[in-house]
Image (cartoon, helix red, strand yellow):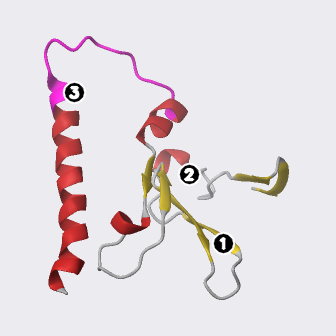
Amino acid sequence: MLAKSVLPRVRRLARIITSVGKAMTHRFHRSTPYSPPQPLHHELHRAARFWPANVAGFDGEETLPVLELGGVFVFVYLDPVSAELLVSVDLETVDQRLVRPDETVPMHITVQGDTVFRA
């Protein structure tokens, strides 16, 4: 049982270490030509990650798939009881560059091209 709960953590940690190592090698390699800073949306889109259910959790419990973009976590999953499609947005770790002066995060949500929420 311990191996089941520890193995996903170890795999995720190994991926993180590999990613950091690659980033450090690329960023500080002397032969890498200088590239100007990219617009915020380019930077955040390129850093976006999808975490499947089997690697998203830390505690070994059943986890949900999640899309991470700019520190925002978007969960899309099926409710096991009602079979409804649920969408949940977690802004707890949002990149502060996305936060407005009034402490809100601009959001525009559409379904089939129709706006259902805008703030």
Q: Earlier in the sequence, mark 2 or mark 1?
A: 1
Q: Which quadrant of the figure contains the C terminus?
A: bottom right
Q: Position of residue 56 (x, y in %)?
A: 38, 66
Residue type beneath disc 3: Arg
Tag 3's secondary structure? Answer: helix
The main secondary structure of the magenta stretch is: loop
Classify 10 Å Cα crowding around label 3: few (below 14), some (14-19), many (20 and above): few
Q: Which quadrant of the figure contains the N terminus?
A: bottom left
Dot 2 corresponds to which residue?
Answer: 99
- Of residues 22 and 61, the one nearer the viewer is 61
Asked if the residue under mark 3 is in contact with the one under mark 2, i.e. CB atoms within 8 Å, the reply is: no
Magenta stretch bounds: 25-40
In the rendered image, the vertical position of residue 48 relative to residue 83, given as above or below? above
Task: Identify which residue is drawn at 16% across, 79% down.
Answer: 3
Task: Identify which residue is drawn at 16% across, 84% down.
Answer: 2
Q: Earlier in the sequence, mark 3 or mark 1?
A: 3
Tag 2's secondary structure? Answer: loop
Dot 1 corresponds to which residue?
Answer: 86
Dot 3 corresponds to which residue?
Answer: 27
Residue type beneath disc 2: Val
